[in-house]
Image (spheres, helix red, strand yellow):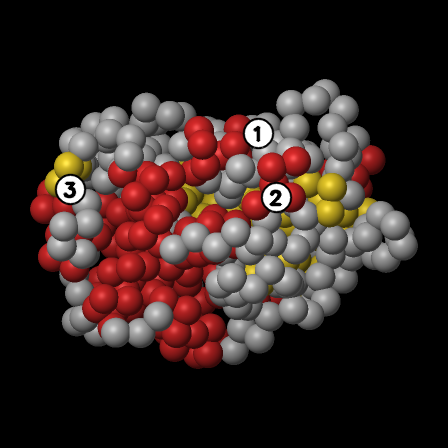
């Protein structure tokens, strides 16, 4: 996937890439080498050959925690990457949003079979859309057919090149972005195919707010951040800064130039991402979150099964090869045949991957503070850790 391809999917891991899927049986990963030397080599290669400014990876398994890095957090000062750094996680946010929704389902506040119309009457109607036919479940597994607002040509143009500097502090309301998404007719009837769309997760978060009477950020804190003590994780809303230690986020601003100029995109208002891709976190917090989530300690059994019931991702716009999508999480089959689970995301100057075994007892979280290296960097890192042939 090229940076420009991911950008057009909503500026987080999106459009590089049939309802009614089944729970995919996990493969078992072999035990990796104790020194994680293969992962370190993959990190070094990402900088030396992939051009990444800096990259980090954190591994947790039964033996404990390992952290590795390559490159720098700041190309001007040469400051090295550190374990405690905070960074924008892009669409990895969707796993948090889906968890909030499923916690509310477990509390009896709403149902996955509720329709959008029940909670947001009149909002999704016309131009081929009918909110009475779209369920909360279909929002979370991207089978609603609702167009991704990030693919709107006029909206996308505001985030490319010099236009990004003009609009980097713009504030968007959820209603504005949903309206942009609904301006393009659906590609299929709800529940009949897969189309990755950030509009889905804006609608899901709006339903959370309607069901609880609180902001989505408040519910995220109540149900996930506070119980897990994720001290480096936040949903900043309109605040353009990353509070606390962080790497510089370097971006090509999706230039089509073969040798694009690199810009500092660290500071920006991510209201355009919100519940679909606006969270800031750390490798450690992501490890804790996905460890608890995959391990079945965040959701009751019924909601856990719903989250990990997957659908094919071979819709009208191809998504990441070898994947199936659940509710805010996806499975990915690595080249060696091992399947890992979690989520990933991309935004200006930051790409993140957080994956692990289905039981959550073996996890790897990685982040690049640049947006042009491509997905192969993460495939190599995951394969080095989870594939038997590469872990010896």
Q: Earlier in the sequence, mark 2 or mark 3?
A: 3
Point out the residue furthest to the top here.
258
In the depicted structure, whether residue 246 falls above or below residue 253: below
* Residue shown at 23% from the left, 45% from the top: 138
- Residue neighbourhood size for the residue with mark 2, other residues' Cα within 10 Å, grouped as few (<14), some (14–19), many (≥20): few
Q: Which mark is residue 166?
A: 2
- Is residue 309 something that shows in the picture? no
Which badge, 3 or 1, comes first in the chain's sequence?
A: 1
* Residue at (64, 44) in percent of width and height: 165
Mark 3 is surrounded, within 10 Å at the Cα level, by few (under 14), some (14 to 19) or many (20 or more) other residues, namely few
**Up-down: is 173 above or below 150?**
below
Q: How far from the left and from the top, in percent, is residue 65?
A: 66, 65
CA–CA distance in space, label 2 to label 3: 33 Å
The image quarter containing residue 59 is bottom right
Q: Secondary structure at mark 1?
A: helix
**Residue 319 horizontal/vertical position (percent):** 42, 30
Q: Viewer-proximal residue, 42 or 358?
A: 42
Decide if residue 292 is on the left or right side of residue 247: left
Q: Position of residue 325 (x, y in %)?
A: 35, 42
Q: Which disc, if any, is residue 4?
A: 1
* Residue annotated with mark 3: 125
Q: Viewer-nearest of labels 3 and 1?
A: 3
Q: Residue at x 25, y 54 (%)?
A: 306
């Amino acid at each position: 996937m090229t940076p420009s391809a991911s950008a057009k999917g909503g500026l987080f891991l999106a459009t590089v890439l049939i309802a009614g899927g089944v729970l995919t049986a996990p493969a078992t990963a072999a035990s990796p080498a104790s020194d994680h030397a293969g992962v370190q080599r993959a990190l070094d290669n990402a900088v030396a050959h992939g051009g990444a400014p800096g990259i980090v990876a954190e591994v947790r398994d039964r033996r404990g925690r390992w952290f590795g890095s390559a490159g720098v957090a700041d190309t001007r000062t040469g400051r090295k990457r550190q374990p405690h750094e905070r960074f924008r996680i892009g669409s990895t946010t969707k796993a948090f949003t889906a968890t909030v929704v499923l916690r509310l389902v477990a509390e009896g506040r709403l149902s996955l079979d509720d329709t959008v119309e029940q909670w947001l009457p009149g909002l999704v109607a016309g131009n081929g859309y009918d909110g009475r036919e779209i369920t909360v479940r279909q929002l979370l597994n991207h089978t609603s057919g609702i167009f991704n607002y990030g693919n709107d040509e006029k909206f996308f143009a505001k985030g490319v090149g010099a236009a990004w500097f003009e609009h980097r502090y713009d504030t968007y309301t959820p209603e504005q972005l949903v309206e942009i998404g609904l301006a393009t007719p659906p590609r299929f009837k709800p529940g009949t195919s897969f189309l990755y769309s950030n509009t889905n997760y804006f609608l899901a978060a709006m339903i959370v707010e309607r069901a609880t009477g609180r902001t989505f950020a408040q519910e995220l804190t109540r149900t996930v951040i506070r119980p897990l003590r994720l001290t480096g994780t936040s949903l900043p809303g309109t605040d353009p800064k990353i509070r606390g230690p962080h790497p510089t986020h370097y971006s090509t601003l999706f230039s089509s130039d073969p040798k694009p100029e690199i810009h500092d995109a660290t500071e920006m208002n991510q209201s355009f991402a919100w519940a679909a891709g606006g969270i800031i976190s750390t490798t450690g917090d992501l490890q804790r979150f996905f460890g608890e989530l995959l391990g079945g300690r965040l959701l009751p059994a019924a909601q856990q099964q719903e989250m990990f019931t997957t659908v094919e991702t071979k819709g009208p716009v191809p998504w990441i090869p070898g994947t199936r999508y659940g509710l805010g999480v996806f499975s990915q089959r690595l080249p060696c045949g091992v399947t890992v689970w979690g989520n990933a995301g991309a935004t200006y100057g930051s790409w993140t991957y957080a994956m692990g075994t289905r039981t959550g007892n073996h996890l790897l979280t990685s982040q690049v503070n640049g947006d042009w290296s491509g997905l192969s960097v993460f495939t190599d890192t995951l394969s080095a850790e989870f594939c038997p042939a590469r872990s010896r």
